[in-house]
Amino acid sequence: MRTSTRSAGTTAAPVPACQSARAPLEAELFTSPEVHAAEMERVFKGPTWHIVGHVAEFPQDGSYKTHRIGDVPIIVSRSDDGFHVMVNACAHRGAQVVRGSRGVAKAKAAFTCIYHQWIYDAKGCVLGVGRRQGYADDFPLQKYGLQKASVEIVGGLIFASLGTAPPPIREYLGKRICDTIERIYGAPDLKYVGVQRAIFPCNWKLYVENIYDSYHAVTLHKGFRLMSIRKAAPQLEDVSIVRYGHYLTEYEADVPGKVDLDNPEIFEARSRHDGLSSHVICNIFPAAQFSEQLDVVAYRADVPIGPDATEIQFHVLVRDSDTDELRAHRMWQASNFLGPQGLINLEDAAALARVQVSMQGRAGGMDSSGALRFPERRVDEKAIDSFYGAYRRMMQDEPMQESTQ
Ligand code: FES
Ligand SMILES: [Fe+2]
C-alpha cells in the first residue's frame, strides 16, 4: 500500500520488549484484542512479505483471486503486464469490489463496484464511473484507483507487501530460502489444484511457532514418529532467516516397513524410489509456509481472524506430467495426512486449542523455563526464540537486526 497506515511517531505496541531469549511469553500476546490490532498494523501491514499465490493459479490474463493479508482484504490479479495485488476496497466509498474466491475477469473492465458502478481494470485503475454525466468533464479518473501492494515473484510464488518500504524480497528471504523456492516452485509444469481451509481455534502465533517446534514433531505426531525422521536441523546459520524470523528445515524419513494401519501406503513417497521420503518446510515470517512433504507440494497462508482464531489455507499443486495414479496419491496425502483436516494437523489443532484455552485464563503467560537449550538436539528451541525475537522487534519498531542469541 503506497499510503502509509502507520503514522510517524506511533508509540510502541502493547507488547513488552524481549528482555532475553528465554523470557516468558505473556498470555496477552495470545488473547488481547489490543495486541491483535497492533499486530495487524505493525506486522501484517508492516515491512513484511506474504505469500499470496502461485503463478499456476492464474492461467490467463484476467485470472484473479481474493485473499487477505492480516485483516486487509486483497485482490491478486494477472494482467497483460504481470501480477497485481490491490486492496479490495473501492476508491469511491470503500465498498468491497470483488466477491467470491476466484475467477477470470474481462480483459478491460475487469471489476465493477456494485454501489455506484465504478469500473476498474485488472491493474486496479479506474476506467469509468456510474452516471459519468454527473461529474465534471475534466474529472481526473486517472487519479483514482485501488490501493496497491508491492508485488514480487520468486520461483513462481507470488509475494505481496503492504508496508511502505519493505526490504528487497531477496534480502528478506535470503539466498537459502530463495534457492529452495526456485527448486520446488519454479518448475514450469506445476498445476494448481485448489485449497483446503480450516479454522483453528488458536492465535496465529501458536500455529506458526508449531512449525518452528521440531520437538513436538515426534512427541505429538504419531505419523512422523512412525516414519523415523533421519535428521531435522533447522537452517539457523543463514543470516536472513534469523534476522527476519523465518524458519527452514529439510529432512529425510524412512517409509515405515510395517505399520499397523489399514492403508500404510499413505506414508509412501511415490515420486522417490529408494524407500525414503523428503521433507522441506519453511515459514516465511510472519505467517505463510511453503512445504514439500512426501508427495505433496503446497503452500499455506495463515489468516488471523481474531486473537483466538486463525484460518489455515492449504493450497495444493501437482505436476502436469503426473500419472493419474500419482496425482490421486498426492491428493490423498494432502487431504488425509498433511492438509488442515489431515492426521498431522488435527493433532496440532488439538494441542494448540489446549494452549489457547489455558492462555485465556492465565495471568502469567507461557513460562518456557522448561525449554532448555540443547544445541543440535531436537528439543532445542532456539528456532522458536528466533520467531518471537523478530516479532518483538517488529512490534517495538526496532530494526530487524540479527539476534545475538
Ligand atoms: S463505493 Fe464503489 S462505486 Fe461507490
Ligand atoms: Fe505440528
Image (cartoon, helix red, strand yellow):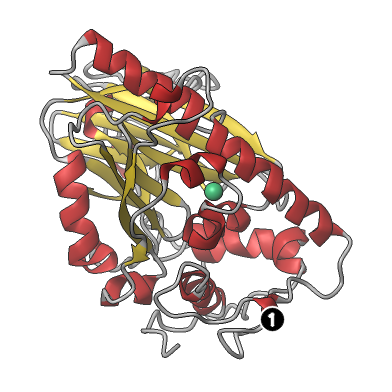
- In the image, is residue 254 above or below residue 105? below
* The residue positioned farthest toward the front in the image shown: 258
Q: Residue furthest top?
A: 324
**Residue 299 seen from this side:** yes
**Few, some or many residues within 10 Å of mark 1 (<14, 14–19, 20+):** few
What residue does disc 1 label? 369
Give the image location of residue 213, x and y in percent. 52, 61
- Give the residue displayed 73% in from the left and 71% down from the top: 366
Q: Which residue is at a point 17% across and 65% down the rendered structure image?
A: 175
Left or right of 358, for residue 227? left
Q: Quadrant of residue 184?
A: top left
Q: Is residue 93 visible?
A: no
Q: Amino acid at mark 1?
A: Ser
Q: Is residue 137 left or right of residue 222?
A: left
Secondary structure type for disc 1: helix
Q: Position of residue 45 (x, y in %)?
A: 48, 58
